[in-house]
Amino acid sequence: MFLKPLIEPERLRVLFEISRGRAGDPRMAKRIERAFSVRRPDLEDLAALLSPAASPFLEQMANQAQRLTRQHFGKIIELFIPLYLSNHCVSGCSYCGFASDRPIERKRLTLEEIDQEVLTLAQEGYDEILLLTGESCGAEDFLYLLEAIKRCRRFFNRVTVEAFPMELGNYRRLVEAGLFSVTVYQETYQRELYEKVHRWGKKQDFGYRLDTPERALEAGSRGVGLGVLLGLGEPREDLICLAAHLQWLYQRHWDALFSVSFPRLRPEVGGFSGTYAVTNREQAQFIYAFRIVFPKFHLVLSTRETEAMRDNLAGVGISKMSVGSRTTVGGYHQASGGACQFEIADHRSREAFCAALAQRGLMGVYKNWDRSLR
């Protein structure tokens, strides 16, 4: 579990206990009412809002989440596009379609193919790209990623990376090349489970991964994106630990941009299934709770989720989304290569998705930042 530098074990135990509160408990009802009324909700308030006891308050939570989202982000949804550079991987994550023991076709984009994919996406209007790779960490893989960032930076103001964790010096080189932000999910903060599902590879090192967002920010990354894989571990405990991690980072890097994602387990070629099934209602509740406690952070929902789920949560907590995604290598300029990391659920085109946003009074925005004006 979380160790002392981030949150005291006794406080963590109390937070977990609050998160297990049941509907009908008058003490929990008071806690939840307090979370709605205080100016700066804390982790105890978050635990109450995450609990089963808060389920009857879902409409009130949605209303407050929408009000805060409008206050801080207006009626826009920031859009980005993921580009998988490679599905080669040396790790053995039980839940991932790219794990090294999966019998799949492996592919890595050549530099020329990267140029083609990036140009296609830039011509379609995207201005923020998320580059993804498998868990490899050799010098060759780093230099490949470094070159990919340089090529993307010619067309995109925001280049974000979700790849293998690196040392401080390597993150500094990526920032110098044009890296804007780093996304890294701890997947689960429950250490025993973490060690069980990460069967081999560098990703087995719980502490090294936990420290990755801090290293990225120390290196000059403008922001970081965090998240847990909902359904892998007990979700409320994971989300409380995630919140404690965010709070710890924010106290040290208050001027950074933070985003939080809420991915649920999806089918992949390995057939892994989690212990905890997170329902649509629970996922919505979790998102509303985070918006109430972290009103200024981007909350992100990907194409893992269905059209209906994404439409209903857009602007009601969620302020940023991917659209038109591929989870295979490449796939925008020409047919994608290799297997997908996981199955997506929202296959709509960019135009169809933005039309759905417009029907709800929202606007999808491709560019909300220009580095030249910094």
Image (spheres, rainbow, N blue to C red):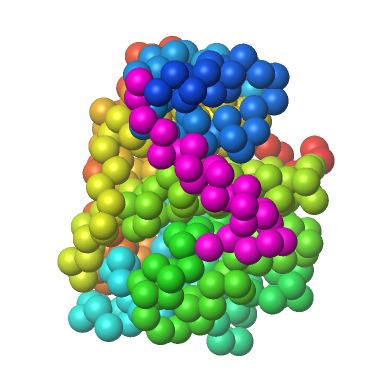
Residue 195, relative to residue 311: is it above or below?
below
Which residue is depicted at the point 30% across and 66% down? 95
Left or right, residue 29 beside residue 267: right
**Front residue (pair 182, 94):** 94
* Residue 34 location (% of width, % of height): 59, 19
Magenta run includes residue 16: yes
Q: In this view, does 123 lie to the left or right of 368?
A: left
Q: How many labels does the image show?
A: 0
Is residue 98 among what the camera can see? no
Q: Quadrant of residue 207?
A: bottom right
Picture coordinates of residue 164 (x, y %)? 53, 72
Which region of the structure is painted magenta?
1-24
Screen quadrant of the C terminus: top right
Q: Does the magenta stretch include residue 374?
A: no
Relative to 369, is 219 on the left or the right? Answer: right
Residue at 60 percent across and 79 percent down: it is 142
Q: Residue at x 35, y 72 (%)?
A: 197
Q: Where is residue 305 in the image (x, y as percent from the top left)?
A: 30, 41
Extreme residue toward the bottom, this view: 139
Q: Is 349 left or right of 150, judged from the image as shown?
A: left
Q: In x, y percent, where is residue 25?
A: 40, 23
In this orientation, which residue lies closer to the viewer: 270 or 307? 270
Q: Quadrant of residue 369?
A: top right
Q: In this view, does 37 lie above or below 331?
A: above
